[in-house]
Amino acid sequence: MIDLTGERFGRLVVIQRAPNKRPKRTRWQCRCDCGAYTTVDGSALRTANTRSCGCLHDELARQHGATLNLTHGHTSGGNSRTYTSWSSMHERCRRHPRYVGRITVCERWDSFEHFLADMGERPTGLTLDRIDNDGNYTPTNCRWATHSEQQRNRRALRVTLEHTCECAICGATFTARNRHAKYCSRSCRYEQARRTYALLDRSRHG
């Protein structure tokens, strides 16, 4: 692992290592030039996908606001579906606990014009979806998808997160999200508890 402490990435300066949320995803606590603190994946820093705490996007959005209205008409008379998807994407990455420091938006998509050029207008009945749920918002990892397509995508991710374990009581193999799971069923957990209590009772009565 490369120590990034003290390194600058855009507006962010790395302060210290932060706890990992997932294996092999090194995270760092950073201080932004605006004074805010944020936690970011090391890969997002090195690839320049994250360059600030979110303040840079806000500034660019304000700068683009007037020209967006004139050039595309996506904010006149209320935001269009496409503009809403773009704005919500940035909002999730800045504020949602499951996204902050883990999922980022590529630098190109700080601009709504670039997002529109890459993705096109949002079709009726579709929303923005990441093909790889562990990947960032980039032109190659995003698509317009139906609700059912997104649900299948999430189910596929859940399957990949399951681990094969062996029950400590009956020896049966089973799948679980926790790779350290020890019991395949409630009855086996009860059996373990019964054995523990019996052991304690014997030790008390010597």
Image (spheres, grey):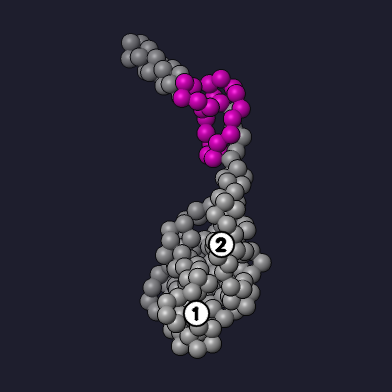
Query: Which of the labelled discs sits on residue 33, or is there none?
Result: none
> Whole-percent x and y of residue 111?
54, 80
Please indicate, yes or no, whether residue 160 appears anywhere in the rendered image: yes
Residue 168: in magenta span: yes
Q: How many marks?
A: 2
> Whole-percent x and y of residue 177?
54, 40
> Along the polypeptide, which appears first: circle 1 or circle 2?
1
Up-down: is 67 above or below 94?
below
Binning the other alpha carbons within 10 Å of mark 1 as few (below 14), some (14 to 19) or many (20 upward) gives some
Q: Nearer the viewer, residue 85 or 55?
A: 85
Query: Which of the labelled discs sits on residue 74, or is there none?
Result: 1
Name the residue type under label 1: His
Residue at (47, 68) in percent of width and height:
88
Query: Where does the N terminus fall, quadrant-wise?
Result: bottom right
Q: Secondary structure at mark 2?
A: loop
Residue at (55, 65) in percent of width and height:
124
Which quadrant of the view contains residue 49? Answer: bottom right
Residue annotated with mark 2: 126
Residue at (59, 30) in percent of width and height:
174
Q: Tell me where the magenta segment starts and ends, as one range.
A: 167-188
Which quadrant of the view contains residue 113? Answer: bottom right
Q: Main secondary structure of the magenta part?
A: loop
> Whole-percent x and y of residue 120?
61, 73
Query: Where does the C terminus fall, quadrant-wise?
Result: top left
Name the residue type under label 2: Leu
